[in-house]
Image: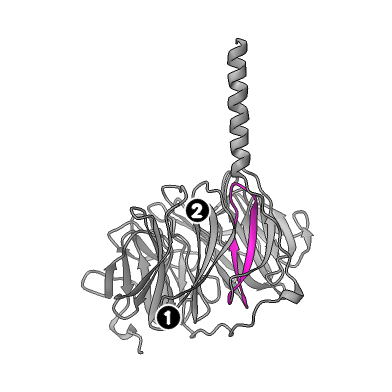
Amino acid sequence: MNQATIHRLFLITTLLTLAGCARREPVEEIRAKTSDSPVTKAPVSLAEQDWPWWRGQSRDNHAPGQKIPDSWSESENVQWRIDLPGQGWSSPIVLGDNLYLTTAEEDSSQQSLIALDRKTGTERWRRVLHKGALPKKHHKNSHASETPASDGETIYTAMVNDGRVWVSAVDTEGKVLWQSDVGPFRSEHGYGPSPVLHESLIIVNGDNLNDCFIAAVDRETGKIVWRTKRPTTGNHGGYATPIVAELAGKPQVVLMGMGQTSSYDPTTGKLLWRCDGPAEVAACSVAFNDDTVFASGGYPEKNLLAIGADGSGDVTDTHVKWKTTKNITYVPSPIHLEGKLFLVNDRGVASCLDATTGEELGKRRLPGAFTASPTLIGDRLYVPNEKGTVYVVKADPSLEIITTNELGEDCYATPVASKGQLFLRTHGQLFCIGDASAQPSS
């Protein structure tokens, strides 16, 4: 190799290094201050069967006390179906007589929030939140994969646009109240985490190829209340939605990704405990009971862990109750029910485990590949595969397939149930499933 070639290679290497440095924007931590507490906002006000955020009011994808048809067809139990503009894998949220969902139109580079009439599916309004500068994404992701969240008065979205994580607040009439830049985001496969609410805060996951973080903003003003840095590998992003729950007697926000499962104080962002695993990349949410979280993932590692939630600091060697490399789900989130853990993995293997021991109690193959998470309605799991076949499965070790229904379009969005109606989003449509008695009154 001659000197000129060596010199050119040196210049190219230097320029690539500088370009990489230019892309990397460091994230500074923001500590919650008691003197700068969130502005007082009305308490979260929801009807009993509203579905206000990812995985429902109980944050576990349970829809108890509902009568949903097991089967439907063009002529039976389809109350309405509508075409949706753009694409998005987010689920709708349900507030009273209205639905809200996000969508993105790649041709016009727009990301929007849409309000629909629950009874008819008629569009009430559409509000463009961002235009231009959409991030690169995986072909199985969308630019509107994040399910909105609401306190009953305001709808909150989290999206990535122009290399930033943005949280937006929109009232029920479609007026944008504020938009907050929560931090930089360098995309690998796009964005996926949904915003979660805790008291006066909206919490978002910012795992990406640069500095990873989890942050909370005041839901009245959009001001960042706290932002905590997370481990960063620089190799991959993260796609999991945090879960806020009362665990081991105290509120915790639990998030998988970057090689660990981490718990934070939702009010301050302080790290409570961390555990190695399940994987560097996580895309689903944890399942949980009163004192244990169940963390499944992911890529490149494949593990499923049951972690005691009453520890502090590094609990890797002290609080892992059981661990397995079988029955791993990557994108679909698991469900805990009465001492049993139900999983439908990406390849269609449904399994039921003893949540205390990890012992496999039952297994069944569901044809197809799966991105959507199963939703528990009564004692049955409703789970669509990517081709739009919806399986209704007994939530017991038999995992018996009760019925199979066809939507006729690809489906990556998780089903939502409210007041006897089931809402299923495909790549281009939204279905409302329910018998005649399920029409909600005004």
Residue 422 placement (x, y as % from top left): 37, 74
Relative side of 97 to 61, left or right: left
Does 202 appear in magenta? Answer: yes
- In the rendered structure, which amino acid carries the disc numbered 2? Asp
In the displayed structure, would residue 394 be above or below residue 23?
A: below
Q: Which residues are magenta?
A: 199-220
Residue 82 placement (x, y as % from top left): 27, 69
Instruction: Assess disc 2: are there few (<14), some (14-19) or many (≥20) residues with their C-alpha within 10 Å of its C-alpha.
Output: some
Residue at the location (36% across, 67% down)?
A: 424
Give the residue furthest to the top: 2
Residue at the location (38% across, 83% down)?
A: 97
In the displayed structure, would residue 301 be above or below residue 334?
A: above
The answer to whether residue 358 of the structure is visible from this angle is no
The quadrant of the rendering that contains the C terminus is bottom left
Instruction: Assess disc 1: are there few (<14), some (14-19) or many (≥20) residues with their C-alpha within 10 Å of its C-alpha.
Output: some
What's the distance in space between the residues labelled 1 and 2, CA to CA?
Answer: 42 Å
Residue 341 placement (x, y as % from top left): 56, 64
Total numbered labels placed on residues in the image: 2
